[in-house]
Image: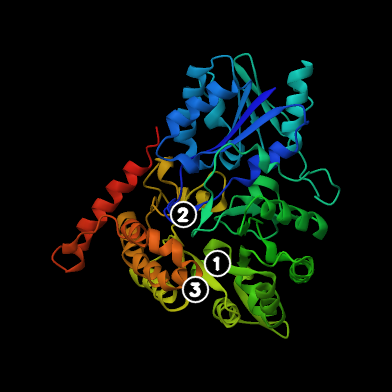
Amino acid sequence: MNILLMSMPDSSEHMPSIAIRMPNGALTSLAGNIDPHHRVAVADLILVQDSVRPTVTRLVHELQPDLVGLSIMSFQRKTAKKIINLVRTLRPEVQVVVGGYDPTLAPEAYTEQSDALIDFIVRGEGEITFRELLRAIEAGSGFAGIAGLSYRNGTDFCHNPNRMVSHLDQADIRLPNRAARVLSGYTMLGHQVDVIETSRGCTFDCSFCSIIEMRGRNFHTYNYDRVIADIRDARDRGARAIFIIDDNISLNVPRLIGLCQAMIDAGVNDISYTIQAMTSAIANHGETLAPLMRDAGFRYVFLGIENILEEDLLFLGARSKNTQRENGRRVGNASLKAIEYLHRNKMYVAGGLIVGSPDDTAEAIEANLAFARKYVDWPYIQHPTPYPRTPMTRDFQERNLIINDRLEEYDGTTAVVRTEHLEADEIEFLRWKAERWIKLRHLPATLRHNPGFVMRNGLKMFAHTFRGSTLGTFLGLEDERRAFDRYRALRRAERVYL
């Protein structure tokens, strides 16, 4: 079969395509886990945001796919449906399968359609389900026995039982097939970037997170040899930066220590790595862990600070993973200690913060912004977003705080919920006003890291960060809210890809 797999072009405000264009790791993993006689192509449409329609048209004409698959998040749903309609117009007989967070957690958005947009949903982990789906299509054997699959049966949809997640230690998930990519241009601050994973899952119950609903409360790991082989494959294909996309790599600290040592021993520490980590893991084990991370090549750590206020951490369900302990006793928030260890070992902190919880006041939001100004290198500040089936969504619904149901704006940086004290627009304005200047402060570090990239793109990065602003804005000749309104209009226009 000819198979075309696509990820959506929609990107977050925090991942501007001029500086960061990441591959979708799930699609190359799917490509690596199907039977080898299939002809498969992977297209990350983030690489062609300005030419989505002609690119999809060209790929469909060139590849003549029998099946098209799309990986979709909630804020990408509108774009995905437009792409499906385009594909159906170009090749009416094609079969369409969707997967990822949004189809898994909100399947009704794809099945309750009179125009038969899709044929299949691969729910949860997709590698084995997708492989079995292709075998069933070829054999004409029916789909009822494929766990994790939803499929069209006439005018109805049948939903098979969920598939158990893979334990990853049994070699049932093969390495990704990066050779299947048909577009190029992946970058992180001027360095060719790729993604790998060393584990899947998390056992914490943060109220804003979709992971538990997606795959249950579990944590499974690949062995070190498999991880090193994945890194080497990415490096051999030109990657000089790697984002480790584990849900929570720091959940098992002894394993992370062992992994760092294995990376050093294997000589793959000549790459710049970015990871996501909990503050508690770094704060409570940083004396040993942080130097090893640096020696292993880790340069950027996305630190899940979430919020510095105790009451907000309780609402977010993130208190336990942000707790510093001494001799088994809780001694406070782990964020400062974690940042201290990372900075001491010359790693940059991308500070993950969430502002706009139901009881937040302007003072509560400013407290978090002030923390970001003082301590983090790159702010990754988001607003609570009611993604399908998360505990936080139910809370916002019960309190009638959701004011925006336009899913294309559910990208984390558009405030779509209000608090008991502030309107959503005010919350977003406070974040936007502060965050631009914090990002600008990181430019000298980027210059040291990759001077050529900054020399070529510094002005474009500045223009992107401050888009909507004019000379009058900087001179104080106009209200900043006018610049904010222009920024929001530009952001809305950016979300229209075809």
Kind of residue indicated by mark 1: Leu
Residue 141 screen position, x and y as percent? 79, 17
Q: Identify the secondary structure beneath mark 3.
A: loop
Is 384 in front, or is 463? 463
Disc 3 residue type (three-letter): Ile
Q: x, y (%) of residue 427?
A: 34, 60
Measured Cα–Cα span from mark 3 to mark 1: 11 Å
Q: Is residue 450 above or below residue 137?
A: below
Q: Earlier in the sequence, mark 2 or mark 1?
A: 2
What's the image's color scheme?
rainbow
- Figure quadrant of residue 272: bottom right
For this orientation, the residue located farthest to the right is 170
* Local crowd size for mark 1, using a 10 Å CA cut-off: few (<14), some (14–19), many (≥20): some
Where is mark 1, residue-wise?
314
Disc ID at residue 308: 3
User: Helix, strand or loop at disc 2?
Assistant: loop
Quick check: 265 left or right of 302?
A: right
Of the pair 484 and 175, the residue shown nearer to us = 175
